[in-house]
Amino acid sequence: MVRSRFAPSLIMATPDTSGADARAAAEWAARNSYGKLIAQLTARCGSLSLAEDALADAFAIALANWPRQGVPDAPEAWLMKAANRKIIDAVRRIQTASRHAEAELSFTQEASLVDGGDVPGGDRRLELMFLCAHPAIPESAHTALMLQAMLGFTAEEIAAATLETPSTVSQRLTRAKRKLSDNGLPFALPPPHILNERTAAVQRAIYAAYTGGWEDVPGGEHPVTGLAREAEWLARCLVRLAPENAEAKGLLALILYCESRRAARRDTEGRYIPLTEQQTALWGEPRITEATALLTEAGKMQAPGRFQLEAAIQAVHTARRQTGRTDWAMICKLYERLQTFTPSIGARIGHAAALLQRGQTDEAVHLLDELPQNRISQYAPYWAVRGHAMKMTGNTEEAGESLRHAASLSRDTATREWLLAQAAEI
């Protein structure tokens, strides 16, 4: 079943076996084309909310019609045309309800909307992301708005990724979309002198999308969402768009280092393999080489930032291929520097994990104890690291409880089983 972020209507539908091909085609279009379709629709009609509603309706129509009529040769183009018609219907209702009301479309040439059903070759996802990062939108809403607009993330999924409550995220999204609609913001890439001001928000959203695809592993239990691949593609686009931006290169390097290890994260039986135990021979050389070159280029620009430092941490892990050991002292130094740029929960937990590897248990526990409980209560990585820390202090009871709690919070069966095995050993 396709995940909810792509099209809520798909989850509600329950077609019979004869509609299996139609459903598979709709799922494929949802996974591979959602952001592209939303970007094209928003560019045409000038309203993100209207584009989202129209595309959701188009998916519902597809599931109703394709089992009977057959899957079209070009599912994306079919969905675009169906969504265009829904937009026109919505505008007509607005105009009928109030003849003096402004139509929500930025233009009302109905013929050009209907005739423009094909999905153009040009991809406008980056333009949509920069629109979502407009200064008229509160900075706190930038990442959430991009994740929902580009990838169909629900408020609940965004809240899980940002360690916030779904109600907070939902309210933030509603206000942001209202501002987009009320201000008539231009759907276009900003000029060069403004581009860099918005690039950081776009980078954060791309990385959040990448982490959303982290569980796309060979033989994994979850359907491959394509999020990791899409995030890598967007990061490449951003580097081409802003070649002088060191952090854009750092972000792409970070993604490439992480992607190089995807094949090593499970054994032949599908069991989870932690980074420190992975076979380095399975790490992908081409991505590592490209990542190293990008990180070197970024370093020469002398504009350090969060993503360059995170990529540097991954580069140190990668060096284990040649040395056979991990320089945990260097990783700790990089985490300390990283926290001057982003004192995030994830960075502090990563630092604690590195301290444990160096045998600095007291320092690691102190770092973990300082984290706000309301932010980490449902965050599996925190409890996994805490379990390891408690094991090293000899507090076996709390170690087992922490590891079991981490397992209960994990969506991935292989990771959950590994955590439970760690708890059982204690």
Image: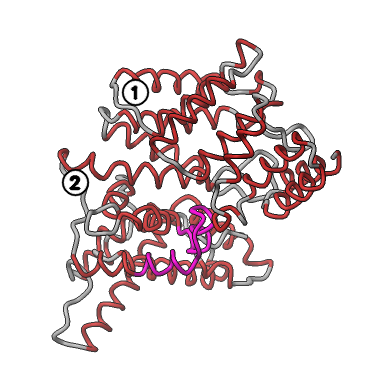
Q: Compared to 10, does 366 lie above or below?
A: above
Find numbered disc 2 in the image and state the secondary structure of the residue it sits on.
loop
Please state, as top left, top right, bottom left or bottom right, where the C terminus lies in the image: top right
Q: Residue at x 48, y 18 (%)?
A: 289
Q: Main secondary structure of the magenta part?
A: helix
Please state, as top left, top right, bottom left or bottom right, where the N terminus lies in the image: bottom right
Kindly check if marks 2 and 1 are in contact, taking CB atoms under 8 A apart as contact. Answer: no
Residue 334 spot, x, y in % from top left: 48, 26
Q: Which residue is mark 1?
A: 298
Q: Is residue 55 left or right of residue 354?
A: left
The three-letter code of the residue at mark 2 reads Pro
The three-letter code of the residue at mark 1 reads Ala
Residue 299 spot, x, y in % from top left: 35, 20
Q: Name the residue nearer the viewer: 82 or 198.
A: 198
Residue 140 spot, x, y in % from top left: 35, 56
Magenta-colored span? 152-174
Viewer-nearest of labels 2 and 1? 1
User: Quick one: label 2 or label 1, which is nearer the N terminus?
Assistant: 2
Q: Residue at x 44, y 66 (%)?
A: 168
Quarter holding residue 318? top right
Q: Which residue is mark 2?
A: 190
Find numbered disc 1 in the image and state the secondary structure of the residue it sits on.
helix
Q: Compared to 254, does 114 lie above or below?
A: below
Q: Residue at x 38, y 52 (%)?
A: 143
The colour scheme used to paint the residues is secondary structure
Quarter holding residue 192? top left
